[in-house]
C-alpha cells in the first residue's frame, strides 16, 4: 500500500531530501495525477508486479516504478522503456541483490535498441553517454531512484559501494543503427528488427578509447582489446562481460575492413586475454582456491571477457575523432549477467505466468 | 501556502515477521559443524582455523566445508534444507564485501530458520550493511563474528590469531550463552 503524503508545495523537495528519497538532486514531486498518467502510458495497473528480490523481501509493482519515473523527470511516453528496464533489473540473472549491494559500485548501464528509442527522442549520437537529453537522463535516473528507494539500496547501508562512480546517477543511451552489414544489437541477440529491446549490464564507469589516426579496423580491434586488458580491472583475469560503445569512425573502420560483429567480438575477446604475469607485475595477486578460477588456459593466458557472446558492441556516438568507450562489468560473470528484454507496448498484456496460487483448490472444511 | 499530495516511493513500513532463531540447546557430542564458504579469498582458511579453535571447546565430529560457487548468491532453499538435515552447527563466511556479507548473513539466517544454530563471520566495515539486511530478513540485531578489515590480504599467522581471538565469540553465539537477541525478542 503506497503512502500518500500531504505536503506544503514549497516543502516537497526538502522532505524528499530529508527522507533520503533522492539521488542528491531535486525530484519532480510524484503527485497522484502524474503517477496515473505514467501508468496509463505504460498500459499497466498500479498493482501489476514487475518482479521481486526475495533476499530483500521486496517486490516491485508498476505504481512504484511510475513514482520513480515521475521523480526522475521522465515523460509518460518513456514509461514502457522504464517498465522493461525494471523487469530486466529484477531478472535473477542480473542479480540486483548483489549488484546494488556490492562494494564495486556498479552502474545500471541501460541500452535501448530499436524504433521506440527514436520515437521518444532518445540520444544515440553526439554526447550519447553525457548530459542534455531528457529521455537518456531520466530513464536511467528512474532505475537508480527505484533502487535507492523501493529496493532500499542506500549508500553505506544496503548499498556498500566503496567509491561508486557518476554512472550511478544515470547511464542510459540508445543504439545508433550501425552501418550495413552490421546488424543491430537487438537482432544480434535474437530479436526482430521491428522490436525495441532494453539491455541492462551492471558496469564500471566508461573508459574512453582513443584511436584517431589509424583507420585500419584490425588495428582498432587491438585498441579495444588493450583498453579491456587492464590488470587493475576487477573482472580481468577472472572472466566477465563488457559493453563497448563503438563510435562512428571506429564503426567505419570495422566495416571497411570487412570485420563482422561476430569477428570483432571474437578478436577483441581473444586479444584481451591476459598473462598472469602481467597481473602480478601490476601488483595484483592471483586468486588461488577461491571462487574465481584463475587457472590459465591452454594458451597460458586468462580471460578478460569470458566469450564472444559476453561482449556487447553498441554503435553510438557523434561523428568526429576516433572515440569509443569501454564499460567492463563490475564483477565476473558468475556474479551477474547482462539481461535483455523486449519492450512491450501499452497495448500488450503482461505475460501470463501460468497457474499461480490463485488456482489452489482448498479442501472442504470438515462438517460439524 | 498551497499543499499538494505526493506518493511515497518507499513501500509503507510493514512489520517484518520476526524469524525465530534455532533453539540453543546443549551441543550434542561429536557435533557436525558445517562451514558455508563463499569462496572469497582466505574464507576457507579463516573458517578452518575457527573450526580448529572451536574443537578445543566443543565436542566436534565431522567438520564439513560447503563451498558456494559464488559469494554473490545465498545458498538455495534446497541446499539449506539438505545442510540442515546433517548439520548441528553452521558458520557462514566470509562477509568482507557488500554483496558477500549480505549473502552469507542470509545463509546463516536460513539455517536458523531450519533449526540449526548459526553465525556469520564479517569484517568490521560491513557491520552497518549487515545490520540493515538483518532487519529486512526478520532478525534485527542478529549476531556476527566481527573481524578487523581486511582479512583477505592477511598472512596465515594473522588469520590463526584472528581465529583464536574470535573463537569464544563464535562459541557463545552458537551455544547461546551470549545471545544478543533476547532483548530484541
Image: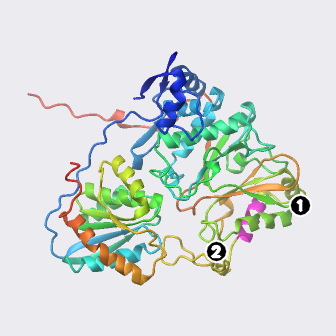
Which region shows up in magenta? A262-272
Count of marks overlaid on the render: 2
**Whether labels 2 and 1 share one chain:** yes
Q: Residues within 10 Å of mark 2 (few under 14, many from 20)?
A: many
- Which quadrant does the N terminus of chain A fall into? top left
Q: Quadrant of residue A140?
A: top right
**Which residue is labeled 1 in the image?**
A257
Seen in the image, is B104 located left or right of residue A86?
Answer: left
**Mark in the foreground, 2 or 1:** 2
Height in image: A131 above or below B93? above
As drawn, which residue projects farthest toward the top? B2
Q: Dot 2: what SS?
A: loop
Give coordinates of residue A56: x percent, y percent: 41, 47
Give coordinates of residue A291: x percent, y percent: 49, 70
Say which residue appears at 26% left-offset and 49% top-offset.
Answer: B19
The secondary structure that dominates the magenta segment is: helix
Height in image: B36 above or below B113? below
Q: Is residue B151 magenta?
A: no
**Which residue is labeled 2 in the image?**
A302
Amino acid at each position: 500500500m503506497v503512502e500518500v503524503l500531504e505536503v506544503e508545495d514549497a516543502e516537497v523537495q526538502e522532505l524528499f531530501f530529508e527522507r533520503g528519497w533522492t539521488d542528491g538532486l531535486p525530484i519532480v514531486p510524484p503527485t497522484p495525477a502524474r503517477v496515473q498518467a505514467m501508468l496509463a502510458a505504460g498500459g499497466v495497473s498500479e498493482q501489476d508486479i514487475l518482479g521481486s528480490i526475495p533476499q530483500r523481501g521486496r517486490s516491485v509493482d508498476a505504481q512504484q516504478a511510475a513514482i520513480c519515473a515521475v521523480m526522475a523527470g521522465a515523460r509518460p511516453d518513456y514509461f514502457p522503456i522504464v517498465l522493461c528496464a525494471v523487469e530486466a533489473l529484477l531478472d535473477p540473472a542480473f542479480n540486483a541483490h548483489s549488484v546494488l549491494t556490492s562494494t564495486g559500485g556498479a552502474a545500471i548501464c541501460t541500452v535501448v535498441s530499436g524504433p521506440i528509442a527514436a520515437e521518444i527522442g532518445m540520444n544515440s549520437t553526439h554526447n550519447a553517454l553525457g548530459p542534455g537529453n531528457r529521455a537518456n537522463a531520466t530513464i536511467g535516473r528512474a532505475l537508480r531512484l527505484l533502487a535507492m528507494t523501493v529496493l532500499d539500496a542506500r549508500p553505506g547501508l544496503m548499498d556498500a559501494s566503496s567509491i561508486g562512480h557518476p554512472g550511478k546517477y544515470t547511464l542510459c543511451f540508445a543504439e545508433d543503427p550501425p552501418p550495413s552489414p552490421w546488424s543491430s544489437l537487438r537482432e544480434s541477440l535474437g530479436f526482430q528488427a521491428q522490436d525495441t529491446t532494453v539491455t541492462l549490464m551492471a558496469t564500471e564507469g566508461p573508459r574512453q578509447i582513443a584511436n584517431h589516426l589509424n583507420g585500419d579496423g584490425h588495428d582498432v580491434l587491438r585498441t579495444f582489446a588493450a583498453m579491456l586488458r587492464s590488470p587493475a580491472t576487477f573482472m580481468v583475469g577472472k572472466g566477465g562481460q563488457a559493453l563497448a560503445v563503438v563510435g562512428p569512425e571506429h564503426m567505419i573502420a570495422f566495416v571497411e575492413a570487412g570485420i563482422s560483429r561476430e569477428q570483432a567480438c571474437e578478436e577483441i575477446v581473444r586479444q584481451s586475454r591476459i598473462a598472469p604475469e602481467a597481473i602480478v607485475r601490476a601488483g595484483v595477486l592471483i586468486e588461488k582456491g577461491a571462487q574465481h578460477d584463475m587457472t590459465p588456459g591452454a594458451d597460458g593466458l586468462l580471460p578478460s571477457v569470458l566469450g564472444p557472446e559476453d561482449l556487447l558492441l553498441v554503435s553510438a556516438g557523434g561523428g568526429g575523432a576516433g572515440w569509443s568507450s569501454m564499460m567492463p562489468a563490475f564483477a565476473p560473470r558468475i556474479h551477474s549477467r547482462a539481461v535483455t528484454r523486449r519492450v512491450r507496448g501499452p497495448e500488450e498484456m503482461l505475460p501470463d505466468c501460468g497457474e499461480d496460487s490463485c488456482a489452489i483448490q482448498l479442501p472442504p472444511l470438515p462438517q460439524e | 501556502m498551497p499543499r499538494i499530495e505526493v506518493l511515497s516511493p518507499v513501500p509503507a513500513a510493514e512489520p517484518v515477521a520476526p524469524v525465530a532463531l534455532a533453539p540453543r540447546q546443549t551441543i550434542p557430542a561429536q557435533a557436525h559443524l558445517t562451514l558455508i564458504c563463499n569462496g572469497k579469498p582466505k574464507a576457507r582458511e579463516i573458517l578452518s582455523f575457527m573450526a580448529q579453535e572451536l574443537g578445543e571447546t566443543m565436542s566436534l565430529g565431522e567438520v564439513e566445508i560447503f563451498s558456494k560457487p559464488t559469494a554473490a548468491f545465498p545458498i538455495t532453499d534446497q541446499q539449506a534444507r539438505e545442510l540442515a538435515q546433517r548439520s548441528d552447527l553452521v558458520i557462514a563466511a566470509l562477509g568482507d564485501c557488500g554483496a558477500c556479507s549480505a549473502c552469507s548473513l542470509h545463509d546463516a539466517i536460513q539455517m536458523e530458520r531450519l533449526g540449526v544454530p548459526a553465525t556469520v563471520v564479517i569484517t568490521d566495515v560491513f557491520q552497518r550493511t549487515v545490520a540493515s539486511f538483518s532487519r529486512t530478513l526478520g532478525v534485527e540485531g542478529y549476531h556476527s563474528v566481527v573481524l578487523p578489515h581486511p582479512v583477505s590480504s592477511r598472512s596465515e599467522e594473522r588469520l590463526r590469531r584472528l581465529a583464536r581471538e574470535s573463537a569464544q565469540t563464535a562459541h557463545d553465539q552458537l551455544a547461546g550463552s551470549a545471545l544478543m537477541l533476547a532483548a530484541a525478542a
